[in-house]
Amino acid sequence: MIDGARHFIGEYQAIIGLVVLALMFVGFVLERFPATVVAILGTCTFLFLGILSGKDLFSVFANPAPVTIGAMFILSGALLRTGTLDAIANRIIARAQRRPKLALAEMFLGVYVASAFLNNTPVVVVMIPIMLKLANALGISAKRLLMPLSFVGILGGTTTLIGTSTNLLVAAVAQENGLDRFGIFTITPVGLVAGVSGILALIFIARRFLPDDAPSQIALSQEHRSFLTEIRIPKGSNLIGRRLGDIPFAKRANVKLVGLKRGASLRRSGLLDEVAEEEDRLVVRLDLSELLSLRANKNIVIGLTAGNDEVGQDDEGIIEAMIAPSHPAIGRRLLEIPFLSMLRVRILGIARFRKTAGPDLPNARVQAIDRILVTGPTEQIEEMYGNPHLYGVGSTSEREFRRSKAPIAIGALAGVILLAAFNIMDIGVAAIIGVGLILLTRCIDADEAWDSIDGNVLVLIFAMLAVGLALENSGSVALVVGELTPMLRDVPPWALVVATYVISVLLTEIVTNNAVAILVTPLAIAIARELGVDPYPLVVAVMFAASASFATPIGYQTNTLVYAAGNYRFVDFFRAGIPLTLAVGAATCVAISLLI
């Protein structure tokens, strides 16, 4: 019986491989299970059937692409941790106050350029709240900015080899199939054509197909992320005598000066032109990451204590907690909250959903579900975990910026790009060395570095590499190539490029792009060789098509991010994404036929 089954599998393994692949595609489309689970189940099926051996399975871990992708995730994480992307966004927001339309154009250009050299997903993550603020400043719906943000990030990512994980993956699979190594800027000419055509199409599409809801509808939902705090300027501070508008942290877009307490008075207007005096208290609204970053500033004292300043603002223990409706301090001033007098702790700030607490930190009236940030000695902080009137007591998920390390993080990324661009070193090796440098210099901590890696992406890549190898071993690829080659024998090369692009882009809209890249690339190479044509144009077509996912919110990760943040409907992506897909696809296919 077993021998008969083995004989049957051996005789029909090419067809069995295609059946397993078809079932995997059904699993991808139905989304009953995550894409990683479907890919792993497909790998396990090939292992169980004996089509894929254990040796074959472990050989996929020698592929350099996933390691390179993981290293680039960490380098992108270091730029986030050091506040580099945040600083760029702040500059653009500052310019938006003077020339909003020009700032909008600069912001999209910045996203395009950044996405060419960083993983575009963290770029979009950083820019979403900035776009919300800019939409509010321009008086337009955030929906008119968030979807273009994702699309521009995708277009920027296709400009270089390192802009997306898909490009690196296709290049690695092509190299395994005998093609020469892609350089970091090999696809840039085509990428620029695709980018320009896409941006021009976006300008046309934005006026006609993007939704236009009430301007403040989405932006208001983000206000609960802002904390209110109070900053005292102590004796000996180097801020004394300086104009408040010239103080570095006051210039940042995620910091807003809302009040100045001097003696018994509280001023609300003309604050930036005031000159700082000793014992001034600045009432500030700011993002959590910025609040954490200011703890290291020795020229200011942040927050609130019951007594004097015996509790440091940068103590080791720090937690975030939510005020329960049963808390006895509800309706009372924050200064009167019981644990503040019972424990040696400092309240760094308070956040309120969709509203701003006030008028200042000590006199803010406590409400249910307010969030507070508290620091103090570890043993004092630990006592707060048992407080029945506080919900969700735990370490904050945010981290402070390490701005002094920004030049190192930027230099590490630039070094990786230059070493790869001039063929001095393989990009994977250069990226790993870059990771070692930023870890050694503590641009980012080790635990943060590993957290910045998207594990789902790497697991999916390894599993799909195994599936691709199984399809090769089973003869499934050869079977498909043998069936398609006679039909394509008289097709001109440009038509092969178009066909490859169309098939890849259609699959990308319903299946994860990395899976499409792994499966279609070897197939395109094999068909090109059978037909006696250059395989490079077809491989580049797969690269671009596997990233050009504009018509659905599930085809690419950045689309999914803005889909949730902008509260879009699924059909919104159809209306704007389909014409953009057609415009970019046509320009890309022409560019590939002429330039590759």
Image (cartoon, rainbow, N blue to C red):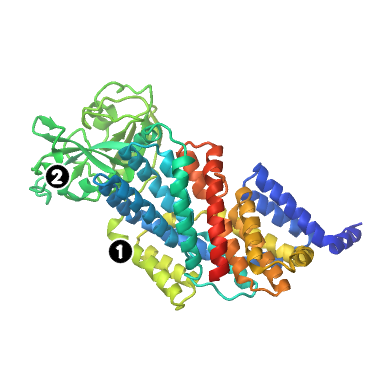
On the rendered structure, is 314 left or right of 179?
A: left
C-alpha span from label 1 to label 2: 27 Å
Q: Amino acid at mark 1?
A: Pro
User: Can residue 549 be spotted in the picture?
Assistant: no
Q: Where is residue 235 drawn, in percent x and y?
A: 9, 46
Q: Above or below — where is 69 with respect to 98?
A: below
Residue placed furthest toward the bottom: 424
Mark 2 crowdedness (10 Å alpha carbons): few <14, some 14-19, many ≥20:
many
Whether residue 477 sits left or right of residue 234 in the image: it is right
Res 407 label: 1
Is residue 544 or residue 432 the one in the foreground? 544
Against 177, residue 281 (above or below) is: above
> In which quadrant of the rendered view does residue 438 lie?
bottom left
Q: Is residue 185 above or below residue 339?
A: below
330 vs 270, nearest the viewer:
270
What residue lies at 61% left-to-right and 74% top-to-bottom? Answer: 179
Answer with mark 1 or mark 2, whichever residue precedes in sequence: 2
Q: Verify CB contact (< 8 Å) between mark 1 and mark 2.
A: no
Q: Report crowding for label 1: few under 14, some 14 to 19, many 20 or more residues within 10 A (C-alpha).
A: few
Name the mark on residue 244: 2
Horizontal relation, residue 554 to residue 228: left or right: right
Residue 303 lies, in percent from the top left, at: 23, 38
- Identified by mark 2, the residue type is Leu
The quadrant of the image that shows the N terminus is bottom right
Q: Residue at x 37, y 36 (%)?
A: 219
Could you tell me if residue 104 is visible in this image? yes
